[in-house]
Image (cartoon, rainbow, N blue to C red):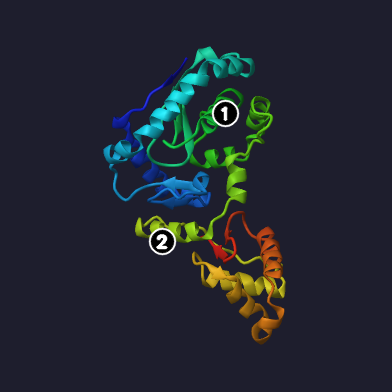
Amino acid sequence: MITFKFDLEKQESCYKIVKEKLKTQFYQDLKFYVLPFLPEKFRNRVVFLPEKCEPEKIFKKQKAKIDQLEDSWNKVSKEFIKKLKIYFPKLDSIDIIISPQLYGTIGSYQIKEKEIIIKPRYERKIMGLKKLIITALTHYFFFDYNDKKDKADKDWFDKQSKAAEIENSFFPQRKHKSMLKVLDTEFAGRLAEESSKYLEKLKATSKTQIVKPDNLTKNENIAFNLLLRSKNKLVSFEEISEWLWRENTDEKYSEYAITKLIERLKKKLPKNLIHSQRGVGYLLYV
C-alpha cells in the first residue's frame, strides 16, 4: 500500500536530522552544497537548511507545490503501482508512505522492516518522485538495508546499477542519472563558495584532508598550489593564466588550455574536489 501524507509536525524532526548529518560529515564528504536557500539551478546537489527551523513559514509559502505533487501522484499512482508489481512482486508485503520534506536533499528515503518512507523535498516533480520510489524499492528488495547507515549510504550511491536497469525500463526515453552521477557532473563554483561560507558559519566545515599527488606535472603543480592556497574561493582563468605563463600571459592565454589542464588535474585527485564556474574559473571545494 502506498499513501501520500505531508506531516507538518514532523518537519522540525527533519530539520534536526539534516543538522545531525552535518555533524557526521555525511554531506561534506559527498561535496553537497549546504545552503540556506534554494537556487534556480543545481538543486539536485543542494542540501536546503535555513538558519532557523520555521516549518510553518515555509509550508505557508510552498503549500501549492506540495499540493501539486500530491495531485500529480494521484493521477499516475494506479498505473505506476501496477507496473511496479512487475519488478517488485512482493510490493504488497510492505507499506510505503510518501512524506514530502521541507528541508534536506532533493530526495531521500528511510527503510524499516516492513515500511519505506519516501521523502521528496517539497519542490520535487512527479518524475523525480517515481525515480526515488524505484531506487528505494531496489534498495529494499535487492540489497541488505539493515546496515545502510551513513558510510554505507555513501557506498550505496555507487551501487545503483540495478535501480538504473529497472528505471530505464520504466522511462526508456530518460536516461537514469544516479545521485553519484549528479555529484560527478553538476558543479557551480559560486554555490560551492557560498556553501563553504555557510558551513563555516554553522561550525560544520569539512574535515577533508588534501594530499598533493606525487605525479603532477609542472603546470599541474602550479594550478594545484594556487587552488589549494585559495581553497573554497573561486580562482579566475586570468589568475591561473598569470601563474602559468607569468609575463607571457597576454600572448599565451587560453581558456581551452587551462580547462584541459584542470581536467588532467582532476583525474589525479579524489572525486569532486575541483568545482567549476562556467566562464569564470575553478574552486577547490574542501
Amino acid beneath label 1:
His
Q: Residues within 10 Å of mark 1 (few under 14, many from 20)?
A: some
Q: Secondary structure at mark 1?
A: helix
Say whether residue 112 is visible: no
State which tag comes first along the sequence, 2 or 1. 1
Q: Is residue 178 above or below residue 224?
A: above
Residue at mark 2:
197
Q: Position of residue 18 (x, y in %)?
A: 39, 43
Residue at 53% in and 72% down? 229
Label 1: which residue? 139
Q: Relative to residue 209, is residue 183 depicted above or below?
A: above
| Residue 154 - label | none
User: What residue do we see at 43% from left, 51% from top?
Assistant: 34
The residue closer to the viewer here, 282 or 211, is 282
Mark 2–mark 1 distance (CA, rounded to whole Å): 34 Å
Amino acid at pointer 2: Lys
| Residue 216, percent from left and from top | 70, 69
